[in-house]
Image (cartoon, helix red, strand yellow):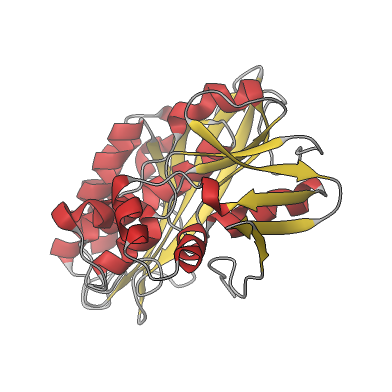
Amino acid sequence: MGRSTRSPKMPDARQPAADEFSEIERLFRPLTGGVAGAFDLLDDAAVVPQRPGFDLVVTKDAIVGGVHFPEGERPDLIARKLVRVNLSDLAAKAAEPFGCFLAVAWPKAFGPTERETFAAGLAQDLRTFGVALLGGDTVSTPGPLTASLTALGWVAEGAMVRRAGAEPGNLVAVSGTIGDGGLGLAAVRGEIQDAGGWLADRYRLPTPRLDLRDILQRHATAAADVSDGLVADAGHVARASGVRLSLNLDRLPLSLAGSSWLAGQADRVLGLIRLATGGDDYEVVATFAQTPPRGFTVIGEISAGEGVEVRAAGRVLTLSDRGWSHV
């Protein structure tokens, strides 16, 4: 894994510098899966082979303690969520994942046991999704745990589904159910009841919608993953495509847990807004020229113009918060 800005590198300020390389060999080399271009993580770089007839899709997401996961979260769950949120980006591009690069900054509280647990979680999900670790970097930090993954995927040449591509007359649809991620965070915080911990699991371990790859390639005109909130991510599609996007929150597909929560809200419209702006769902919002295939729920339409219009209960809503902002 690569060099840091200081030499030698120290993944933990309490340990000798030489330990980093043995730690990489022990914890991360097995995650390469023997891919030749990873060079057993002994080099400062990797080689990504060409695949004739395919484009290489590259995405990168980072997570920070206290921002993207609660303080005290289990290290293996942190690593698994890191993998999944990155693969969600590839899923929305209709790409097939194959490799990744990891950068992680260990806080002082993250000793050998915590790092081993993190690596075990990483290994579990890289194996589950068939992804090889190709390289990266480990450093120490006085701040919270910070980790970043760069994920690589293949898509047929010219076939990547972009945010740009939606046209007037297209239908807006979303996969799965919406609102569970935001409710899951509330459940983790103890703010709402969560029988069986289902909502918390939806927040901690979202499922990247890699199963939608063929549908998106064949039918979608544009797509984005729902990470910052449905309204916000639909807005990214509208902006990139140069169109106006209308959403009807009364059409939101809800899980049993989401429906139950909404039924207990004094104001249904405010509840729908919370579900549509909460984020962390990692579903796919996409546009289609015709009625989308099974697995997607139509929730709006595209017209000429710009921006996002949100409706519920027969009226247009004015939203002060459309989703998570990183600034």
Q: Nearer the viewer, residue 136 or 215?
A: 215
Q: If the image is split into quadrants, where does the C terminus sit?
A: bottom right
Which residue is farthest right?
304
Residue at x 42% of width, y 44% of height: 177
The x and y percentages for residue 5 are 49, 70
Image position of 121 with respect to 15: above or below: above
Q: Is residue 48 visible?
A: no
Name the image quarter holding residue 293: top right
Marks counted in the figure total 0
The x and y percentages for residue 62 are 47, 60
Image position of 227 with respect to 278: above or below: above
The x and y percentages for residue 126 are 32, 38
Name the image quarter holding residue 220: top right
Which residue is farthest top?
53
Residue at x 44% of width, y 27% of height: 211
Q: Nearer the viewer, residue 308 or 57?
A: 308
Q: Nearer the viewer, residue 6 or 322?
A: 322
Q: Nearer the viewer, residue 5 or 196?
A: 196
Q: Say left or right for 236 vs 79.
A: right
The x and y percentages for residue 26 are 21, 48
Image position of 149 with respect to 300: above or below: below
Which residue is farthest front?
314
Q: Say left or right for 201 vs 284.
A: left
Q: Is residue 263 visible?
A: yes
Name the image quarter holding residue 171: top right
Image position of 113 with respect to 14: above or below: above
Q: Say left or right for 315 vs 87.
A: right
